[in-house]
Amino acid sequence: MTWLILIYWTFAYLAGSLPFGLWITHLVKKVDIRDSGSGHVGTTNTIRQAGFAPGIAVFLLDALKGFIPIYLAIRAELPAWSLAVTAGLVVIGHCYPIFANFRGGMGLAVAGGATLAISIPAFFICLALLIFLILLTRHSARAALFGGILAPFLLYALGYKGNVIWVVAATGFAVAIRFTIDWNREYRELWLDRENAEN
């Protein structure tokens, strides 16, 4: 079982490391997404630099690379603690991808995909929590950080246990740590402001 767990951990990190934002933006605009805007390899920066359609493609692919490792790990009946490590590694892979010199994205879409694999209702609860926190704080990074911390506690309070809590806690912790780098970022210029980003 140990070697199987290591295979799933490795696969999760490598899947997370696939930098779709970098590849798609380069394909569409011939630019390195990390050199402009927020510098993050994710959906928002892709939209601002390459447009809505490439951004949506990146979002779906990032969510999928979070979904697949967790879906397979569940089917393999990995222990809960190992499932949590798998979930954390797929987010870490996205944030620090080996295929992009360890300069990646923020992990929200990947965490969402992992949560979707473990529980569809839990995914929507976490999404609602994130939206509420964005409206409350008016700052996306701080909302994501607080959301990552609070999500497992909210789900536990709502009666969720076991694998759902493990996965959400692992991905939430990874996302919260990652978003500390944007704690003081001004977000007014980040939301889809492609024209200013290009000037």
Image: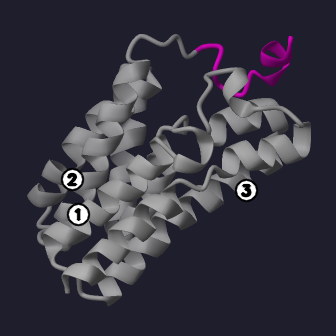
Across and down, in percent, residue 171 comes to: 31, 52
Check disc 2 and report its element: helix, strand or loop: helix
Across and down, in percent, residue 54 comes to: 79, 49
* Residues drawn in magenta: 188-199
- Looking at the rendered structure, the kind of residue marked 3 is Ala
Compared across the picture, whether 175 is left or right of 54 comes to: left
Q: Nearer the viewer, mark 1 or mark 2?
A: 1
Per the image, the residue denoted by label 3 is 57
Per the rendering, the mark at residue 84 is 1
**Front-most of residues 43 and 100:** 100
Vertical relation: 6 (above or below) 72: above
Marks 1 and 2, how far apart in space? 8 Å
Marks 3 and 1, how far apart in space? 27 Å
Per the rendering, the mark at residue 169 is 2
**Front-most of residues 136 and 166:** 166
Judge whether residue 54 is colored magenta.
no
**Which residue is painted at 44% across and 70% down in the image?**
11
Looking at marks 2 and 3 on the same chain, the residue that comes earlier in the sequence is marked by 3
**Which residue is painted at 27% across and 32% down in the image?**
146
Mark 1 is surrounded, within 10 Å at the Cα level, by few (under 14), some (14 to 19) or many (20 or more) other residues, namely many
**Which residue is painted at 83% across and 39% down in the image?**
51
Corner quadrant of residue 150: top left
Across and down, in percent, residue 145 comes to: 32, 32
Mark 3 is surrounded, within 10 Å at the Cα level, by few (under 14), some (14 to 19) or many (20 or more) other residues, namely some
Answer yes or no: is residue 87 visible.
yes
Vertical relation: 117 (above or below) 115: below
